[in-house]
Structure formats: structure tokens, C-alpha cells
Amino acid sequence: MALDDTEAKSPQTETGGIAADRLRSIIERIERLEEERKALGSDIKDIYSEAKSAGFDVKIVRQLIRIRKQEPAEVEEQETLLDIYRRALGM
């Protein structure tokens, strides 16, 4: 009895209906990206340390980065509300 294409696949290629090679490739790519993210996190931490040693307030630097990610209209609305709330509290 001849084996058709689906029966002829090796256990390494397909196991339990799962394409093992494809799964392995996906897992390895994710692992590489996780390592890159870890390295980038370390680099960012180093830059914040550099900013601190240069006399910058790291909390404010983080806030500026967060603001720069926002749309200008959103930033303006937040600043307007902050001003209104400060005046309401007599600040």
C-alpha cells in the first residue's frame, strides 16, 4: 500500500497535525526579539542614567517622552484641563 503525501511526512515535520518546523521557527523568532528587547531596555536604562548624571530630572524626561508620543490636540486638551484644575484649587 502506497503512502500519500500526508502520510509520508516525517514526525519532525508534522506531529499531531502541527507543523513542527513552522512552530520552531516562530518560537525562535520570538526568542530573538525578546533578547533584542532586553538589550534595548538595557540601552534605554543607560541613557536615562546618562541624563541623570548630566543633571536632568529623569522623571521629567520620561514625562516629555510620553507627551511627545501624543497628538498635539490631545496634549493641548490635557494642558488646558490641568490649568483649569490648578486654578480651581488656587494653585
Image (cartoon, helix red, strand yellow):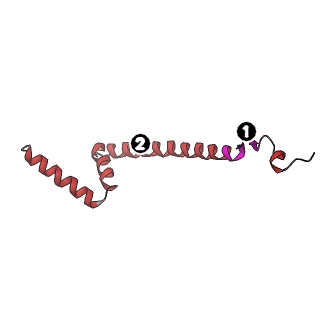
User: x, y (%) of residue 1?
Assistant: 93, 45
Residue at horizontal 46 percent and vertical 45 percent from the top: 43
Q: Where is residue 67 in the image (x, y as percent from the top left)?
A: 29, 53
User: Residue tagged by mark 1?
Assistant: 16
Give SS at disc 1. Answer: loop
Which residue has dot 2 on it? 45
The residue sitting at the left extreme is 90
How far apart marks 1 and 2 lie (CA) works out to 44 Å
Q: Is residue 2 above or below residue 75?
A: above
Name the outermost residue toward the bottom. 72
Magenta residue span = 12-23
Task: For the C terminus, give its image quadrant.
Answer: top left
Q: Can residue 91 be seen in this view?
A: no
Quarter of the image holding residue 7? top right
Please tell me which residue lies in front, 35 or 84: 84
Of callouts 1 and 2, the N-terminal one: 1
> Residue 90: percent from the left, percent from the top?
6, 44
Q: Is residue 14 magenta?
A: yes
SS at circle 2 = helix
Q: Which residue is drawn at 61% across and 47% down?
A: 29
Q: Is residue 68 magenta?
A: no
In the image, 30: left or right of 12? left
Q: Looking at the picture, which amino acid does disc 1 mark?
A: Gly
